[in-house]
């Protein structure tokens, strides 16, 4: 009841989460969050502002017409996210491998990279790597050392093969390889026990890679626009498969296999 004597409704219930204050972002000595966003400034080079402090946790340098990254980048030991996408980089310094704390995102897409330094294999805490839209013909041989990777994107490069160590990425859930020149997958791909999504669209496969038969959690497979002629019988035994896209292949119909997949709820597009 308020001061006028009129009964008032009880206060609306609040979520328990609403009563818990959001944690404040970590702050550096100057009191500002350790994040530097220089997106789309067209700076032409990495500015001195980047080196003004060494506790940045997120550094965004995308779309800055960068042709080089100084080796000094390796001194930013607190970085968790680094975005170098949409620049003109033709090479990367080995010192990128010194960023031991880089655990969230590394964006290197849409550059002019023909090769990645083997030093990237030292980024053992990194969970997301995007090297799409470059000129890569191969990935580092020690790729499998990046044991924390959950998502790897290497679409629209010039890859003709993949390193055997790919199979060591046991935490990997998404693998995006669209728009390359791949004809096969390494046998050790069978070790990707947690893989859920595989994009092999627009490559040169003439068969469904048999290593996929060993992947118990594979849900989505995109094999559009390859050269596949037959759907193997084992495809119907993939236990978690929810969608298999085989459109734009010279595929011989396999109604029995397709029916088996569809009966258990898998969408087959061909």
Image (cartoon, grey):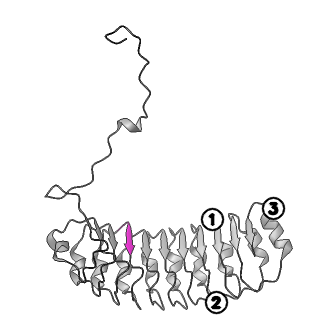
**Disc on res. 60:** none
Farthest right residue in view = 256
Q: Nearer the viewer, residue 164 or 46?
A: 46
State the residue in front, 18 or 5. 5
| Region of the chain picked out in magenta, as a range | 103-107
Q: Are marks 1 and 2 in contact (CB under 8 Å)?
A: no
For residue 55, which quarter of the picture? bottom left
Give the Cα separation between the discs numbered 3 and 1.
18 Å
Find numbered disc 3 in the image and state the secondary structure of the residue it sits on.
Answer: helix
User: Dot 1 corresponds to which residue?
Assistant: 217
Q: Is residue 226 left or right of residue 196?
A: right
**Residue at image point 51% right, 84% down:** 156
First in sequence: mark 3 vs mark 1: 1
Q: Measured along the vertical axis of the image, is residue 240 above or below residue 82?
A: above
Q: CA distance from mark 3 to mark 2?
A: 30 Å
Q: Residue at x 31, y 74 (%)?
A: 40
The quadrant of the image that shows the C terminus is bottom right
Using the rendered view, name the quadrant where residue 178 is placed: bottom right
Measuring from the top left, give residue 105's x and y in whole percent. 38, 69
Which residue is at 17% across, 72% downward?
49
Relative to 206, residue 256 above or below: above
Name the foreground residue: 102 vs 30.
30
Q: Which residue is mark 3?
A: 263
Assign a secondary structure to mark 2.
Answer: loop
Examine the image and state in which quarter residue 130 appears.
bottom left
């Amino acid at each position: 009841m308020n001061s006028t004597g009129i009964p008032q409704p009880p206060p609306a219930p609040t979520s328990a989460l609403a009563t818990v204050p959001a944690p404040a972002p970590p702050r550096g000595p100057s009191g500002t969050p350790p994040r530097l966003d220089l997106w789309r400034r067209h700076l032409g080079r990495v500015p001195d502002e980047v080196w003004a402090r060494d506790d940045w946790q997120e550094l965004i340098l995308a779309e800055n017409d960068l042709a080089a990254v100084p080796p000094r980048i390796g001194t930013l030991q607190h970085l968790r996210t680094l975005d170098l996408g949409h620049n003109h980089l033709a090479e990367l310094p080995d010192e990128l491998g010194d960023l031991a704390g880089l655990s969230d995102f590394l964006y290197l897409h849409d550059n002019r990279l023909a090769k990645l330094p083997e030093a990237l294999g030292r980024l053992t805490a990194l969970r997301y790597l995007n090297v799409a839209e470059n000129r890569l013909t191969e990935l580092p041989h020690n790729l499998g050392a990046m044991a924390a990777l959950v998502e790897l994107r290497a679409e629209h490069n010039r890859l003709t093969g993949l390193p055997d160590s790919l199979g060591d990425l046991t935490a990997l859930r998404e693998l995006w390889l669209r728009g390359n020149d791949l004809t096969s997958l390494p046998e050790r791909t069978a070790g990707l026990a947690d893989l859920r999504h595989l994009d092999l669209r627009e490559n040169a496969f003439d068969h469904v890679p048999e290593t996929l038969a060993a992947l118990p959690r594979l849900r989505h497979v995109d094999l559009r626009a390859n050269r596949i002629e037959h759907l193997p019988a084992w495809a119907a035994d993939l236990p978690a498969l929810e969608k298999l896209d085989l459109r734009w292949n010279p595929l011989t119909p396999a109604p029995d296999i397709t029916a088996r997949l569809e009966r258990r709820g898998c969408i087959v597009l061909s």
